[in-house]
């Protein structure tokens, strides 16, 4: 059974689960190496690239206001029409606060992982700039204060104003949790207070919401860390208000003298404000926007026990997972809207599948787990984590993908940076905070969502428990979990049984646990009085799976892909020096898993026999009446996330069936 | 054997063949209906669209100078800095003279086909405008005289100046041949004289040539119709000079104060001036430019008996036909350069395959036949004619394709017009002049290149001969040719035996002709004294072929297409109401040809059994471990050229092999 065909949502209400903070989990093993790469390289690189881009010139009130970067225009004699910058023109500078904020967040988690006084001093300096920049009333936006003064709150639809606030809030929470320093958190509480004074259902307040969702989930984080319920209510307001009529963006456009129809993306589906969120049943528009919205909705559903949101989220989850998700956990196939197109439209070579979108899907899936452990969400979170998200970061943490295609001719290679630098700090902060995705904690309940060598100190309300995982997952399927409690404690421990692991076996202190009885929603639950020294052994079978796509995915018709455990595999030209589409994999071909500790930081490759179409007897013909002859060939597949870390070459996820 | 694998070029010199003028051939049957559609609709539509676009405002010196049209710029954050209008070095207005000229040319052929006094009066008025516009010295360019005065001959690389002259010359020759009116011909002779006074190897003249080839082949036409050898020599000069060092475009750029490196398309391969033409061995750059160049080269090779050009042309022909040509005769897969990319790169759904490029390939192939009948060229001409070119014109002659993909999701539909309106008048003039592609005439030799119900009055130097073809080709393979001569005459008659027609049979006055002995270069030659009433019967077998692409064409791997006679077939959604990529065609599936006189103006369809991947047992899964189940389905294929003439829907040329 595929990981995407998980059991349906639970019908009974569950405890409210919250993820552990980053400092609660020590990560080793597979993810430990990834976190180290971010702490060792990415965090510094992100800061340096932000500086090179000129971001500090924009936020630091002590520096001259920088020039506006006008999008590059051809200066040829014929391109006489020079663009004029208008209020509705988007430049990268408009969302620079968000890029700096995600850089701060990445740095925060990295500083927890490894002290880095030089980086910490630089981040402190950036925070000081924001402190100076903040206005008396709490308002804080380097764009609207320095680049477009006088226009605040006039174009929520296009200009990322609340989005930037949201990311700065996330950065503030992370920096506080990792370093204990409150300055940015206090700044952002003042700004959140100001936003709360401007937006809301009360008379005289704006009933608006951001064109790029993010503030919602950020306010939930802020509410959780401060205990201030007003932020939680404001998050719910933004969710509830979205897409209501009369439409805020129509009114706002008219208020600034613009025609509401003059919207570049034509439809409010682009920012998911085409209808109230509880009425939405199709995943549409800009992929990252959609995932951030659903993340916020899931948080609000959890915190308010709002089943009307939960029902809508499950419809959207079904839609994404049954019709619009790449096998890698990538999503949003189209560059035009950086988002969704039509059902089953999943082009491979031209896939946009932005790194940020997979990261954001992980956010959403993780927040669905707030409503209780459920493999339906956790399997997808794992799929996106091990494939379509970390493919966006080179193994050494220094280079990035924006798009994550499933096929390449060898010219899609990692970048040092991007003109729209959203992805590098997004993958950075996600990897560096991976520990908080592995576990869930609720009153009297603990959940293990992901298997990875790690130690988690969980807060179950009246009880604290330390779980220590020892495992070489995802390369091997054996997981040992040691339980430590200060004194015997009664709680439920939920252990995810991945959808791919049909033959899983579980033992508690050496005694077999009957999975048929103990598994609900794809998690084995053991409720008992736990003692220090209790030991769990979970054995997951990591078989090599062949996956086939739904016949309406025309791009994958007649094709097959390989998967082992959570990892989707691909062929790379460097391992398979023939045109990859000349290869076909017969149904009965034997494949074996081979551990290669010296390859790509240590991976398990898949090796087997296949056929290759011969080019030898074509005699200069481009077309002929005889099909190509076939010859045997040995193929080697590597995990998708690790591609393009060697010499550039072809890459292919979906192989032709023989 | 596929039509693309024809015999190699003849090694012995041949007579110089020239195509008959349009009035020499009366066309009926398949092409007669197409010519009628152009005469009845397209010719008027082209004129009206030119007027609507404002072209007359630009050329008429009695009207105010119109505004410059500024290309639209995208405001998409995903496209920051990327102009939507990719050909950013030009505006459409710069080549409006050429669009009007091709409209005049289409009108000329149409007026010969069917009198249309209203249209003729409008064209006469346009010619009067050009007469008024022409300068004392003969110069004539509505762009440089009205829109960018003072800059003539300063940017041959980008600005289509000689290209426009070439098209106006072609229009002038056609209008003279069809109507006997000399005014435009005289205007263009004066302009050609002026060009001849400006360009050439002599001291004081410019050694430049146009960034968009066209003037070369036009000057050959002008030389042939006027008998003025200076035009022929000027054509040869432009050919010979192209790509020589020091590079003219480098010098020209510096002369206008520009950096030669500041060229939008980066490489002079774009306009085939990267090296002297005789050294070129790869078909590169902008597809239409390339084909127009090779057409001019072929004309010059024929007229000057220049074997150095012929050798280069054969290398280029091989390259195109063995590595870069769609099975439809489409070419130039990429939108970015409107041209060629890399060997075997033939994407189907995103194929650019501009209508103009296939038309231009027909020009080239036809001119290769100037050096003697040879199936190597004629088969490809026929392939492009019946497939990738006329696909660009709706059956009723009113709507157009610019791109001709080989796969569509149903959203690629015919347009009324195009911002760059080169294709509509190009396909219009080609179809309306189809008769001149069917035959070749030389001293003592006649050739039948294409089979179609028609009557040709050929000039063989000392002899005139009338050939009357009676046939229902391409739907049926029987062709009867009646020969009429005023008195018995000795000449060679060359009859093409298409590459697909392995079992062809030929009879002369009822007696079998031995094809093994009489066929050279794919043409059966009968040399004898011909008498009025001589009758030829040719029987071509129109079998249903399966074609397979070279294994390096990754987009066609594991796929097959269907062909019958010269026609490539496709599936359309309207006939096959399942996702077309769910269908697979087993190797042994029986297929039958079925005449459907009421469908699409009368076509032969291909009908047979295939398999379809079932979607029934997927239960909402997007991926699973079992391949799709297959069910039987009956498929119907229609000729590719006729697609998108009914309700919009999917289309597919390359079917999955079962």
Image (tube, coloured by chain):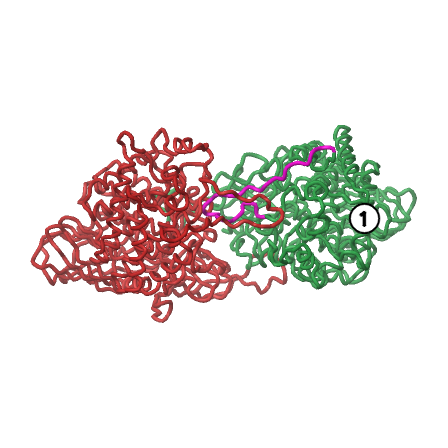
Chain colours: A red, B green
Looking at the picture, tell me which residue is in the foreground, B115 or B121: B121
Check disc 1 and report its element: helix, strand or loop.
helix
Q: Residue furthest bottom?
A: A598
Q: Quadrant of the N terminus of chain B?
A: bottom right
- Is A75 a magenta residue? no
Magenta part of the chain: B62-86
How far across and down, in percent of the image, does residue A73 sit?
54, 49
Q: Is residue B473 visible?
A: no
Label 1: few (<14), some or many (≥20) within 10 Å?
Answer: some
Quarter of the image where one finds residue B316: bottom right
How far across and down, in percent of the image, does residue B108 sit?
77, 37
Counting the numbered discs, the total is 1
Magenta-colored segment: predominant secondary structure? loop
Left or right side of B314 for A30:
left
* Chain under disc 1: B
Quarter of the image where one finds residue B386: top right
- Is B69 a magenta residue? yes
How far across and down, in percent of the image, does residue A514 sit?
17, 54
Left or right side of A214 for A529:
left
Q: Residue at x 37, y 59 (%)?
A: A46
Looking at the picture, tell me which residue is in the foreground, A34 or B250: B250
- Residue A606, compared with residue B173, is above or below; it is below
For mark 1, what is the residue?
Answer: B194
Left or right side of A650 for B424:
right
Left or right side of B542 for B349:
left
Quarter of the image where one finds residue A163: top left
Q: Is residue A21 visible?
A: yes
How far across and down, in percent of the image, does residue A376 sit?
28, 47
Looking at the picture, tell me which residue is in the foreground, A573 or B85: B85
């Amino acid at each position: 059974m595929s990981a995407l065909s998980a059991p349906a949502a639970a019908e009974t209400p569950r405890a409210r689960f919250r993820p552990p903070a980053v400092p609660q989990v020590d990560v080793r093993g597979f993810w430990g190496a990834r976190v180290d790469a971010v702490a060792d390289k990415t965090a510094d690189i992100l800061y340096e690239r932000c500086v090179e881009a000129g971001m500090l010139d924009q936020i630091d009130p002590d520096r001259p206001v920088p020039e506006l970067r006008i999008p590059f225009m051809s200066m040829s004699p014929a391109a006489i029409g020079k663009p004029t910058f208008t209020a509705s023109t988007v430049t990268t500078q408009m969302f620079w606060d968000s890029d700096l904020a995600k850089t701060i967040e990445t740095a925060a988690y990295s500083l927890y992982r490894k002290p880095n006084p030089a980086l910490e001093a630089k981040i402190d300096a950036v925070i000081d700039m924001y402190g100076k920049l903040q206005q008396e009333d709490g308002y804080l936006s380097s764009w609207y204060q320095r680049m477009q003064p006088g226009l605040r709150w006039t174009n929520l639809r296009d200009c990322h104003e609340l989005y930037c606030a949201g990311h700065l809030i996330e950065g503030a929470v992370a920096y506080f949790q990792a370093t204990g320093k409150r300055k940015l958190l206090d700044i952002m509480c003042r700004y959140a207070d100001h936003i709360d004074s401007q937006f809301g259902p009360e008379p005289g307040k704006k009933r608006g919401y951001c064109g790029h969702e993010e503030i919602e989930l950020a306010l939930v984080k802020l509410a959780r860390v401060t205990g201030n319920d007003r932020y939680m209510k404001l998050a719910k307001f933004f969710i509830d208000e979205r897409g209501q009529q009369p439409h805020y963006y129509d009114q706002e456009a008219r208020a600034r003298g613009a025609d509401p129809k003059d919207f570049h993306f034509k439809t409010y589906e682009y920012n998911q404000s085409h209808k109230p969120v509880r009425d939405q049943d199709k995943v549409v528009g800009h992929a990252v926007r959609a995932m951030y919205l659903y993340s916020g909705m899931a948080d609000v559903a959890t915190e308010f026990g709002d089943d009307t949101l939960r029902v809508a989220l499950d419809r959207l989850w079904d839609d994404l997972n049954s019709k619009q998700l790449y096998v890698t956990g990538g999503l949003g196939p189209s560059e035009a809207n950086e988002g969704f197109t039509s059902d089953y439209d999943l082009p491979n070579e031209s896939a946009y599948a932005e790194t940020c979108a997979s990261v954001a899907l992980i956010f959403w899936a993780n927040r669905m787990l707030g409503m209780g452990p459920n493999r339906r969400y956790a399997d997808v979170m794992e799929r996106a984590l091990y494939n379509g998200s970390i493919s966006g970061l080179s193994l050494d943490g220094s280079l990035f993908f924006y798009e994550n295609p499933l096929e390449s001719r060898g010219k899609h290679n990692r970048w040092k940076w991007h003109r729209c630098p959203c992805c590098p700090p997004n993958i950075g902060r996600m990897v560096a905070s991976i520990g908080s995705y592995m576990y869930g904690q609720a009153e009297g309940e603990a959940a293990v969502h992901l298997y990875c060598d790690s130690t988690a100190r969980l807060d179950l309300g009246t009880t604290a428990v330390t779980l220590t995982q020892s495992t070489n997952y995802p390369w091997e399927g054996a997981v040992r979990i040691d339980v430590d409690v200060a004194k015997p404690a009664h709680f439920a421990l939920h252990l995810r049984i991945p959808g791919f692991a049909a033959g899983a076996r579980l033992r508690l202190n050496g005694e077999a646990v009957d999975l048929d009885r103990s598994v609900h929603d794809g998690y084995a639950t053991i409720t008992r009085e736990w003692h220090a020294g209790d030991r769990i052994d979970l054995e997951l079978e990591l078989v090599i799976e062949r996956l086939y796509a739904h016949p309406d995915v025309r791009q994958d018709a007649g094709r097959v892909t390989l998967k082992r455990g959570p990892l989707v595999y691909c062929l790379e030209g460097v391992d398979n020096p023939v045109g990859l589409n000349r290869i076909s994999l017969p149904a009965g071909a034997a494949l074996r898993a081979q551990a290669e500790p010296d390859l790509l930081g240590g991976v398990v490759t898949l090796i087997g026999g296949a056929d290759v179409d011969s080019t030898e007897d074509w005699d200069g013909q481009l077309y002929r009446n005889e099909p190509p002859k076939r010859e045997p060939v040995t193929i080697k597949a590597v995990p998708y996330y690790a591609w393009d870390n060697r010499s550039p070459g072809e890459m292919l996820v979906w192989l032709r069936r023989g």
